Image (tube, rainbow, N blue to C red):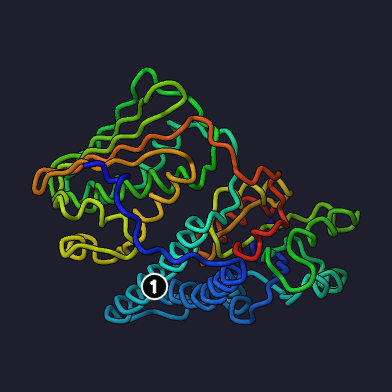
């Protein structure tokens, strides 16, 4: 089944005033959270004195959950802005292989812990560089890889970078994980929707990752396709143009309108 | 330069964020001062004689970007390294900060160990 045909969830359309309100809210939520997280990090590192084992564990828990909240706030803001076409996008040269290598390296530890092998295949026709927004491309690649590792208990993950015809590049990630039931293939793109299995395998996930991927892919003029069999694994195929021009083609302005959301 | 010779001026509007950053420095035996606005920071420079600025990019009044431009124009402060900190991590923002002339960029929440280690590369 082609999940790109999936019906969109009943998305809320935000107007400019509401977007500005949400952006400020995101900032206001993040500010105190950052103080909590940084203080906990110092507590856990015994900056304020040595800790009993139980205390160390408790501070690690606060730290872990504050990080989760920070990620949730960031993801909500990303989703809302992407969905409202209100992202300020960059268009610059992005070397593809280093981006993929970095993302895979970031997941090695988690994969090693489960004895999962990650095989990376770069097909000869793969382009060196694409033009687009590095943050968006990195988000997509990361999300797909994190899902593959999270939902695979044993076996392997194959990451393939290649071409999909003129001026299109392709990322295919195949895992030997739990798979997705046919009736859920479209639902995985619905914001906050999570399967029962998803809650077991990735309890700290927030159900926004693939919704954001879907929006980013739409903005870039690409496609995302899911093929899956329960118990066998999942293959995600992302096809994107090699040149993605920023719709609001203004030069990056350091003190530009994005700064309200960048603190 | 030894860590105990560092003189860090933190420019940050959030009182708790200031406290967190300054505790981080204090724990590492580093002296620091704090200003709640860029305007106040500019006034404090002659008395504090900082050798590094730690700048929150979003500030009431003059923002962190403008603060950097201002200190760069003054020969007395033109060569003092400045590092940026922001709560929203993005490759684009990190790049913009480096292009604007910040010596480094730190996403919040700051990790005390790596923050001090990275500062040591900047404060020579």
Residue toward you, A192 or B28: A192
Q: Quadrant of the C terminus of chain A?
A: bottom right
Whole-percent x and y of residue A94? 53, 34
Residue toward you, B117 or A258: A258
Residue A190's image quarter? bottom left
Residue toward you, A261 or B8: A261
Left or right relative to B60: residue A165: left
Give neighbour class at mark 1: few <14, some 14-19, many 20+ (Cα, 10 Å): many
Residue displayed at 46% across by 73% down: A37
Q: Note whether A80 is above or below A175 in the view shown.
A: below
Left or right relative to A61: residue A41: right
Q: Note whether A2 is above or below A21 in the view shown.
A: above
Which chain contains the residue that carries disc 1? A
Whole-percent x and y of residue A15? 57, 67
- Residue tagged by mark 1? A63
Q: Note whether A125 is above or below B25 in the view shown.
A: above
Which residue extends farthest right? B75
Left or right relative to A177: residue B75: right
Whole-percent x and y of residue A142? 37, 47
Residue displayed at 15% across by 50% down: A182
Residue displayed at 36% across by 77% down: A62
Whole-percent x and y of residue A128? 48, 24
Residue A117's image quarter? top left
Mark 1 element type: helix
Residue displayed at 54% across by 65% down: B108
Whether residue B27 is visible, yes or no, is no
Left or right relative to A117: residue B76: right
How many marks the image carries: the answer is: 1
Q: Note whether B121 is above or below A127 in the view shown.
A: below
């Amino acid at each position: 089944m082609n999940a790109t045909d999936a019906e969109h969830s009943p998305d809320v359309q935000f107007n400019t005033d509401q977007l500005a309100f949400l952006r400020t809210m995101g900032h206001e939520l993040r500010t105190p959270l950052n103080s909590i997280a940084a203080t906990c990090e110092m507590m856990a590192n015994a900056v304020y004195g040595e800790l009993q084992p139980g205390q160390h564990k408790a501070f690690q828990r606060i730290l872990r959950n504050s990080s989760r909240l920070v990620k949730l706030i960031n993801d909500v803001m990303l989703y809302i802005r992407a969905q409202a076409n209100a992202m300020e996008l960059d268009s610059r040269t992005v070397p593809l292989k280093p981006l993929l290598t970095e993302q895979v390296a970031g997941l090695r530890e988690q994969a090693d812990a489960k004895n999962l092998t990650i095989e990376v295949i770069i097909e000869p026709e793969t382009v060196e560089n694409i033009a687009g927004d590095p943050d968006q491309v990195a988000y997509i690649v990361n999300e797909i890889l994190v899902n593959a590792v999270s939902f695979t208990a044993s076996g392997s993950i194959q990451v393939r970078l290649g071409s999909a015809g003129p001026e299109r590049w392709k990322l295919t990630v195949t895992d030997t994980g739990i798979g997705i039931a046919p009736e859920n293939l479209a639902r995985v793109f619905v914001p906050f929707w999570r399967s029962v299995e998803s809650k077991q395998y990735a309890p700290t996930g927030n159900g926004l990752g693939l919704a954001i991927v879907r929006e980013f892919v739409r903005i870039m003029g690409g496609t995302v396709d899911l093929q899956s069999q329960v118990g066998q694994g999942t293959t995600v195929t992302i096809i994107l143009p090699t040149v993605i021009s920023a719709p609001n083609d203004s030069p990056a302005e350091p003190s530009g309108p994005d700064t309200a959301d960048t603190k | 330069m030894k860590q105990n010779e560092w003189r860090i001026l933190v420019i940050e509007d959030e009182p708790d964020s200031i406290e967190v950053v300054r505790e981080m420095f204090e724990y590492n035996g580093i002296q620091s001062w704090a200003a709640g606005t860029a305007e106040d920071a500019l006034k404090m420079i002659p008395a504090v004689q900082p050798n590094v600025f730690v700048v929150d990019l979003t500030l009431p009044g003059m923002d962190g970007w403008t603060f950097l431009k201002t200190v760069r124009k003054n020969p007395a402060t033109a060569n003092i390294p400045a590092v940026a900190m922001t709560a929203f991590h993005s490759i684009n923002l990190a790049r913009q900060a480096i292009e604007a002339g910040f010596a480094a960029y730190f996403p919040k929440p700051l990790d005390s160990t790596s923050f001090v280690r990275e500062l040591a590369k900047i404060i020579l």
